[in-house]
Image (cartoon, rainbow, N blue to C red):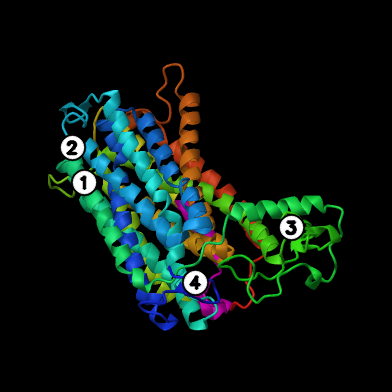
Amino acid sequence: MEEDDIYTKDGTVDYKGNPANKKETGTWRACPFIIGNEGCERLAYYGMSTNLVLYFKHRLNQHSAVATKNNQNWGGTCYITPLIGAFLADSYLGRYWTIAGFSIIYIIGMTLLALSASVRGIKPRCYAEDNCNPTETQSAMAFLALYLIALGTGGIKPCVSSYGADQFDDTDEKEKKHKSSFFNWFYLSINIGALIAASVLVWVQDNVSWGWGFGIPAIAMAIAVCFFFSGTRLYRNQKPGGSPLTRLCQVLVASIRKYKVAVPADKSLLYETADAESNIKGSRKIDHTNDLSFFDKAAVEIQTDQLKGLVNPWRLCTVTQVEELKAIIRLLPIWASGIIFSTVYSQMGNLFVLQGERMDTRVGHSNFRIPPASLSIFDTLSVIFWVPVYDRIIVPVTRKFTGHKNGLTQLQRMGIGLFISIFAMVAAAILEQERLKIIKRHNYYELKEMPLTIFWQVPQYFLIGCAEVFTFIGQLEFFYEQAPDAMRSFCSALSLTTVALGSYLSSLLVTIVTSVTAKNGKPGWIPDNLNYGHVDYFFWLLAVLSVLNLVVYLWIAKWYTYKRAVGTLR
């Protein structure tokens, strides 16, 4: 990027070269390349991960509980590594170069995984369909590839959605209106990729080979990178603002040092730069808020704050810098409420698949069998159905009643999703209860597939898809909008860690439940043969936790104070 690139009011930059002005960059001109990149990358990710629990179980010869825990631990890591990518993007590299660099690591991991499932000597040796005996080296190769993918995705997940939103200027009323729609269509592209993965690629893995099943996602990832670079000349790029962790620590230290200093009643006396822009690169000034007033002490100017005419940033901070810390603190309770929702969401790739494996997978009366993991296609179809319904029907209708430009506030939207997720767990629990009743009545314990069609799982998948449209998309937009300008990748990564912690919590719950219930010769709630277990109890447990989580969320949301940047439109 050249020294004389042109910066807009919200910190984004238009390339001076080709094209050079704001009218010819950003907005929906640039977004198709970003959305296309995300669709292909998600096809690659879900094509590899949707059926992974069965790869662990049948190819790496792991027990159900072990396969579930390994899958959830890996999936959780994929949502922790974005903190690394976000820090680099906000601090030093910018979102463009972070996405570009980590994409290379991603492709290396995908290629290695495909080789580990297809090259003789590296792939596990199998004597029959469910009789494989992998060596430690072969298992290690697979996990090395998976954790390279986890690292690669860490530079993409937190940056792509924020990068797309960067293409819209908050100070331009026309562009700002399109930003909310961008998040809806961005999430739709994720699910189109997931739809192809859950239908086509899972079938390839179950009926052709795991080599091709992992190879096609690697090719999709290469296409995703091509999509991204194709739009380079149209992107608006936000300048990195330096280490956000340093700025947050400076406010903490300055506040503690001045804990005896009184905050003036007139908040205009608090320290702020005289310039129109803040002293943080790529960031606008933020209006002062009255809550968390202890941290305002960091912006109270006293005689010892300056050394030889220069402001010591560890003694005196700007109002904008203080408001950055306040914004992060306010986000944390909302962030924490997403963990239980993510625990519910993670069941689609784990216990839903194991539950479906024990049901009748035939389609009608034909001999064609649908892979259990492919039922997640109904989650995807639900999202594809609800995104345009929300964008074109729910928003205009609710806008008439609420007067809010987006119909519902982001917090209201997320709360509705949390409410719907409760019914997904209730549906899963009721189905498992009925399945176990039939098994007990007809002594079907040793049947690999009992005579109850797998399509009875459709309601629980559909409900989770509906909940996603409200909670996950609302979360994407909320964490972007409420994040300080120079910390948007970090806050997007923060929202993604709820998925990681949800996976880890699910893994912990499985471990606790297994250790408590599988004693004295009892099979426990989640045995290898679920016909002897009680997975329905686990689903009921998640339903109860979801109810409690919703109650806490409503209390938190009631007291939330929204951030507002100086000069932005409400």
Which badge, 4 or 2, is on the more N-terminal residue? 4
Residue 136 location in percent, x, y? 30, 24
Depth check, mark 4 against mark 3: the one in front is 3
Q: Which residue was labeled with disc 3?
A: 312
Query: 438 and 138: which one is in front?
Result: 138
Question: Residue 282: which quarter of the image?
Answer: bottom right
* Magenta-tinted stretch: 398-423
- The residue positioned farthest toward the front in the image shown: 308
Q: CA distance from mark 4 to mark 2?
A: 45 Å
Depth check, mark 1 against mark 4: the one in front is 4
Residue 112 location in percent, x, y? 26, 40
In the image, 23: left or right of 241?
A: left
Q: Secondary structure at mark 3?
A: loop
Q: Is residue 442 visible?
A: no
Q: How many residues crowd around disc 2 within 10 Å: few (fewer than 14), some, or many (20 or more)?
A: some
Tags 4 and 3 in contact by the CB under 8 Å rule?
no
Which badge, 1 or 2, is on the more N-terminal residue? 2
Q: CA distance from mark 3 to mark 1?
A: 54 Å
Q: How many residues crowd around disc 3 within 10 Å: few (fewer than 14), some, or many (20 or more)?
A: some
Quick check: is 415 in the magenta stretch?
A: yes
Depth check, mark 4 against mark 2: the one in front is 4
